[in-house]
Image (cartoon, rainbow, N blue to C red):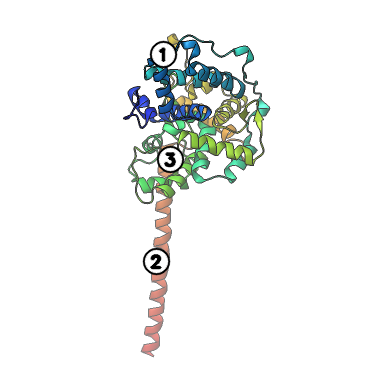
Amino acid sequence: MIYENMSDPINEYCISNGLKKSSTQSITYMLKHYERFQEATLSELIEEAEEEEDKGIRWKHRKLKRRLISYTNHLQQTMMYSSAVVYLSTVKSFYRYFEIEIHNMPGLNKKNSNLPVPISFKDLPDKEVIRQSLEITTPLLQAAILFMASSGCSRKETLNLTIQDYLDSVKEYTKGMNFQDALRFLVENDNVVPTFRLRRQKTNKYYYTFCTPEASQKIAYYLIIRCHNGYDVTEKLFDIGLHHFSTKFAKINDHLGLGKKGTYNRFRPHMLRKFHASALLNDGMTKDDVNSMQGKSKNKTDEAYFFDDPDKLKEKYIVHMSAVTINVEVEKLTIKSPEFIQLENHKNRVDAEIVSLRREMDDLRSMKEDLEGIKEQVGK
């Protein structure tokens, strides 16, 4: 059977399974990897498997079995065990969606697979490495790196953020301001600590986290550049795809010559999450508070009866925020409340108006004196 209407089998598979955009991107990447290894299109591979079934060829003699065995060996030799499991199960699930029979066969041998090399504190990117990464990348990546390092958000949560999520996180500071005025305010003020309420997709847990003022400033600056011709608050905050994002990190890792720890690059999104947790913990923040800000699940009883107070959690974060602040070299940052900042800005505007009025009054006095001098000369 030839799938004439199956011009894009991956798209059909993803739509039928109700996958989100980010999941579709991951599935596409894995199935394209399988295509390249087999040197055939997915449509050709499905057609080949169907023809073998129609001809009644026994499973042990089918090309599909040999293909899956060779692919399993390839994954085992080239990938970490956890990644290889996901790739192989995705390929099998894809075949089964198109009603291709797959009999029982040996899976991955964990003992002979590549297992993660334990990561130590010294393997994490430090502040100097993060500073160097900021110097060689774009405003988008600068904003994302500072955000992830200071919020502890995973790559998936970071790339799922919308512009509205950011505006909501700073609304206590920007009440009554339009979009452009709010962005200018956020760029100019180094005391804004955004509060994000997010859902950890991995655990379906809602949680609160925060980012540093320098991250907020860089996000606002990036949005000013990006949104000068208009914007839609439902658009992604960081306008970049999942794999393109990871590729950018890989280029930074190579440019800085950081190398690998095991099979993983030292500079990658997940390492910024580890940096956030380790930096705050070593600065004296409790593990429970760090876990809360990273959206890590508590036990079922605790989740049902104990809830984090975002205001108190924010106060604790501010105490230790210098640990995840990259470009500001101070022992502790002095953060003012949103209300205080608004009053301070109002006072500054009033002070500026007073200075302007005094200047005008001085100009008027000078003009008056000049006129009186002219009158005296004319009277003579």
Location of residue 286 (image quadrant) = top right
Badge 2 amino acid: Met
Badge 1 amino acid: Glu
Tell me which numbered mark, 1 or 3, is placed earlier along the sequence: 1
Tell me which numbered mark, 2 or 3, is placed earlier along the sequence: 3
Q: Is residue 362 above or below residue 105?
A: below
Image marks 1 and 3: residues in contact by CB distance under 8 Å: no
User: The N terminus lies in which quarter of the figure?
Assistant: top left
Q: Is residue 236 above or below residue 50?
A: below
- For the point 52% across and 17% down, the residue is 66
Instruction: State the separation of the CA atoms marked 1 and 3.
Output: 40 Å
Badge 3 amino acid: Asp
Task: Give x and y (percent) for residue 327.
Answer: 59, 41
Horizontal side of 379 relative to 325 (left or right) equals left
Residue mark closest to the camera, 1 vs 2: 1
Q: Is residue 299 above or below residue 83?
A: above
The residue tagged 2 is 361
Residue 197 appears anywhere in the view: no
Crowding around mark 1 (Cα neighbors within 10 Å: few <14, some 14 to 19, many 20+) is: some
User: The C terminus lies in which quarter of the figure?
Assistant: bottom left
The residue tagged 3 is 239
Crowding around mark 2 (Cα neighbors within 10 Å: few <14, some 14 to 19, many 20+) is: few
- For the point 39% across and 66% down, the residue is 361
Tell me which numbered mark, 1 or 2, is placed earlier along the sequence: 1
Instruction: State the separation of the CA atoms marked 1 and 2.
Output: 90 Å
- For the point 44% across and 42% down, the residue is 341
Image marks 1 and 2: residues in contact by CB distance under 8 Å: no
Residue 306 appears anywhere in the view: yes
The residue tagged 1 is 101
| Residue 16: image tag | none
Location of residue 195 (image quadrant) = top left
